[in-house]
Amino acid sequence: MARARAVPSESARMTAEQSLAGADPRDPRASMICGDPKALPALLIAAGERDVLDGDAIRMAERQTQANIRSEFRSPPDSRRSFPALASATPETVAAIARMADCMNAKVDQ
């Protein structure tokens, strides 16, 4: 079953074209998913289930796992794009921000 998106595909395509300004979308500087996952540190990847980039986030987490790079993927049900930016508006955002803090504190403590 396909997930319902908060942003229509056509709007996402137009935004990507404007942002890229003619650059190759497969260039790793435009999309981390096209780069070498071994060049990245461990990642906490958070994407709302209704986020237009949810599929990219899933693929990025899969690439990190295949490259044996520690990563964590979170996709709260029915969440929209940039849901952590909502601060304390929902239980999902509170949990996402707390998890981000835990990841950063663990890295600092190493």
Image (cartoon, rainbow, N blue to C red):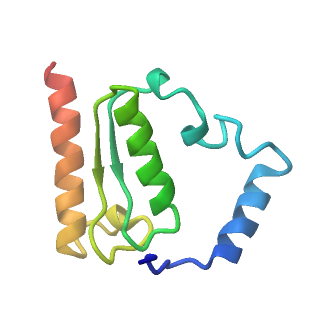
Q: Is 76 drawn above or below residue 98 in the view shown? A: below
Residue shown at 16%/53% (left/top)?
98
Residues 36 and 45: in front is 36
Q: Is residue 93 left or right of residue 20?
A: left
Residue 72 lies in what quarter of the image?
top left
Residue at the right extreme, as displayed? 22
Q: Position of residue 91 (x, y in %)?
A: 17, 72
Work out whether residue 105 or residue 62 is closer to the camera in this orientation and state it: 62
Question: How many discs appear?
Answer: 0
Coordinates of residue 47 in the picture (x, y in percent): 38, 60
- Residue 97 image offset from top left, x and y in percent: 23, 55
Residue 54 as seen in the image, left or right of residue 9: left
Residue drawn where x is 75% and y is 68% of the image: 14
Residue 40 appears left or right of 7: left
At x 39%, y 32%, the residue is 66
As rendered, which of 8 and 92 lies closer to the eye?
Answer: 8
* Residue 42: quadrant of the picture: top left
Which residue appears at 71% of the width and 59% of the height?
16
Q: Is residue 105 above or below residue 53?
A: above
